[in-house]
Image (spheres, rainbow, N blue to C red):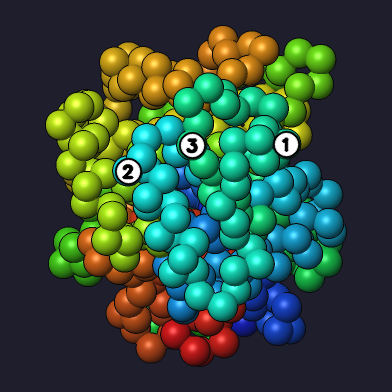
């Protein structure tokens, strides 16, 4: 069997694989990417399109997210997909929610120029979609960017090919990795470095490592409206008090347990289904709404109407838009490793498995890939 050659082989054309292909190609390596589907159809296109540094705790992870943000801006301008550096608003309608926001700002550290606690009137200037009745305060963050993940993930391969000569083989399943050789679509490829960035391929190519990894899967439910009439824009990406209980960046706040206890007592359906409610808007004017979190190695493939109803009912408490009618619903599944931000393993000297970004793939992948490919991680 004839042997093909590349400096770097990447398996998976989701955001993690694309990020590693870019990081390698920028360093002058000849890169080839294999994707088992005709196009990426996994978690990388089934999300809000939120690049969300505000959700990452201070330190290494926040720095990684900000590095990824910088790369997103560069790639978006060259690949020709839309990016909206609209920032974000966390909204507080209850005293315990406001207490968390106040504490977060007080403990934000030296780089406080990116976050600020806003009055209701100041919030209204950032977003005409926010319900100001009963609003106590809003946390403004300037670092968040919105992309349409379907558009971005579709256009990045063409950009990588045209600018760096990265070769993509879609609809090509990798069936074997051994001794720096990959069998893909019946052909043998030799690579100096191999990055396995596809969860499905990880499960089948290294089943023992996958079984011992501690990874679980998380299913989320999401929705999308039709484009808003009259060119209505929501401004900043929006989220309510539930979101303060979800992101680790707020975990250090001593006021958080009181908020969690109140939510559990008043609305147990939210922690039961891992619901926290956010809304973004893409360049087409569509609103993306979600989401929920169900954990397990074999997620239920069927969506629950009650979960979507809980999300929409809560959304109405802090958002008012011209057309809230839902045009599309779906679910996504991503890998999560408890207590860690990613799973990295090296089963062979030339093979690196990268997985388990725990729902932060859009936010962290470009920054993570820089560290992995450069050997810093």
* Residue 47 in the image: above or below residue 133: below
User: Of the residues under marks 2 and 3, which one precedes in the sequence?
Assistant: 2
Labels 2 and 3 touching (C-beta < 8 A): no
User: Which residue is under mark 3?
Assistant: 136
For marks 1 and 3, give the one nearer the viewer.
3
The span from disc 1 to disc 2 (Cα, nearest Å) is 24 Å
User: Which residue is under mark 2?
Assistant: 96
* Residue 309 in the image: above or below residue 2: above
Left-right relation of 200 to 62: left
Rendered image: mark on residue 125: 1
Q: Residues within 10 Å of mark 2 (few under 14, many from 20)?
A: some
Q: Give 376 or 269, whichever is nearer the viewer.
A: 269
The span from disc 1 to disc 3 (Cα, nearest Å) is 15 Å
Image position, residue 238 (x, y; %): 56, 37
When asked about the image quadrant of residue 351, the answer is: bottom left
When asked about the image quadrant of residue 363, the answer is: bottom right
Q: Give 289 or 264, whichever is nearer the viewer.
A: 264
Labels 1 and 3 touching (C-beta < 8 A): no
User: Of the residues under marks 1 and 3, which one precedes in the sequence?
Assistant: 1
Image position, residue 50 (x, y; %): 58, 47
Q: Residues within 10 Å of mark 3 (few under 14, many from 20)?
A: some
* Residue 307 in the image: above or below residue 140: above
């Amino acid at each position: 069997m004839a042997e093909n050659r590349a400096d770097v082989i990447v398996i998976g054309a989701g955001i993690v694989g694309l990020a590693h292909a870019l990081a390698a190609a920028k360093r002058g390596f000849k890169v080839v990417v294999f994707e088992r589907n005709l196009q990426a159809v996994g978690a990388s296109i089934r999300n809000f399109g939120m690049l969300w540094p505000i959700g990452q705790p201070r330190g290494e992870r926040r720095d990684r997210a900000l590095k990824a943000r910088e790369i997103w801006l560069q790639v978006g301008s060259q690949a020709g997909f839309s990016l909206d550096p609209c920032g974000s608003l966390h909204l507080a309608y209850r005293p315990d929610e406001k207490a968390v926001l106040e504490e977060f700002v007080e403990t934000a550290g030296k780089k406080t120029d990116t976050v600020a606690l806003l009055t209701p009137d100041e919030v209204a200037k950032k977003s005409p979609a926010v319900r100001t009745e009963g609003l106590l305060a809003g946390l403004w963050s300037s670092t968040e960017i919105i992309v349409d993940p379907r558009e971005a993930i579709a256009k990045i391969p063409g950009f990588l090919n045209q600018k760096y000569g990265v070769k993509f083989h879609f609809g090509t399943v990798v069936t074997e990795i051994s001794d720096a050789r990959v069998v893909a679509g019946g052909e043998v490829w030799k690579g100096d470095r191999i990055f396995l960035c596809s969860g499905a391929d990880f499960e089948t190519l290294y089943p023992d490592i996958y079984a011992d990894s501690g990874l679980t899967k998380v299913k989320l439910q999401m929705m999308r409206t039709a484009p808003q009439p009259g060119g209505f824009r929501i401004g900043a990406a929006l989220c309510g008090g539930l979101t303060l209980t979800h992101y680790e960046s707020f975990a250090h706040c001593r006021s958080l347990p009181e908020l969690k206890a109140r939510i559990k007592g008043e609305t147990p359906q939210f922690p039961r289904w891992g619901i926290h409610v956010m809304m973004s808007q893409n360049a087409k004017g569509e609103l993306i709404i979600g989401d929920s979190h169900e954990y397990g190695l074999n997620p239920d493939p069927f969506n629950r109407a009650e979960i979507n109803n809980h999300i929409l009912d809560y959304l109405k408490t802090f958002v008012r838009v011209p057309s809230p009618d839902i045009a599309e619903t779906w679910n996504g599944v991503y890998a999560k490793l408890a207590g860690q931000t990613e799973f990295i393993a090296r089963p062979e000297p030339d093979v690196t498995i990268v997985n388990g970004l725990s729902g932060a793939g859009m936010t962290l992948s470009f920054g993570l890939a820089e560290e992995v490919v450069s050997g810093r991680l």
